[in-house]
Amino acid sequence: GAVVSQHPSWVICKSGTSVKIECRSLDFQATTMFWYRQFPKQSLMLMATSNEGSKATYEQGVEKDKFLINHASLTLSTLTVTSAHPEDSSFYICSARDRTSGNTDTQYFGPGTRLTVL
Amino acid sequence: TQLLEQSPQFLSIQEGENLTVYCNSSSVFSSLQWYRQEPGEGPVLLVTVVTGGEVKKLKRLTFQFGDARKDSSLHITAAQPGDTGLYLCAGGGYNKLIFGAGTRLAVHP
């Protein structure tokens, strides 16, 4: 149980284009999903909290107009990197909280998406 | 601002040795999660501890949550090459997780 998928697993795009990454909870409903960014050999950095049916909450320093988040259903959140530039190249990971779980802190992570912007 | 200090940052040991990873904070957390991450993959949940003083065992891994819920430890007995990876602790609170910097473990045959 508690499986989270991400698509695509890797993507290469040209500078200036937009890229959409999908995050799905496969066997549970998630009212809250999270988007993280991870640089090589570093820990996870929270970008934003995605709440089903409402606006995302962005961490300080994260541009909400560049990283668009949509959480339209209890099993799907999307992250769109708009007008991507080489400095946006990174490993993006989503996570989800099981709304029925007794512990509201535990997050289950997707396998990540490697974005390379040329 | 809640911070979690994780140590050591790197650990390189021989198969069969024991090791302990620590996570410490001056803040109280509602829970503490431990994850293991392989290169190019997402973190995989190992355990969640929620009660001060709680001890959980997962085969050769023993997790402990401090009495005051400010610190936690992960002890691995008789490490094996398959234990190699990045271990992350994460404290729960304010509807999000605060991650430690991670411990990169390498177990050599």
Image: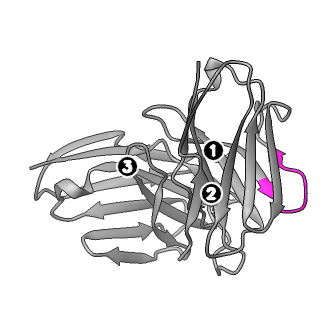
Which residue type does callout 3 highlight?
A: Glu
Q: Residues within 10 Å of mark 1 (few under 14, many from 20)?
A: some
**Vertical comparison of A98 with A88: above or below:** below
C-alpha distance separating marks 1 and 3: 16 Å
Local SS, label 2? strand
- Residue at horizontal 63 percent and vertical 61 percent from the top: B92
The image quadrant where one finds the C terminus of chain A is: top right
Magenta region's main secondary structure? loop
Cβ atoms at labels 2 and 1 below 8 Å apart: yes
Q: Which residue is mark 1?
A: A36
For the point 28% across and 46% down, the residue is B105
Q: Which residue is mark 3?
A: B38
Question: Callout 2, which amino acid?
Answer: Ser
Mark 1 and mark 3 in contact? Answer it, CB < 8 Å. no
Residues marked 2 and 3, same chain: no
User: In this figure, which residue is indicated by the disc labeled 2?
Assistant: A95
- Give, as a single range, the part of the protein colored magenta: A50-57
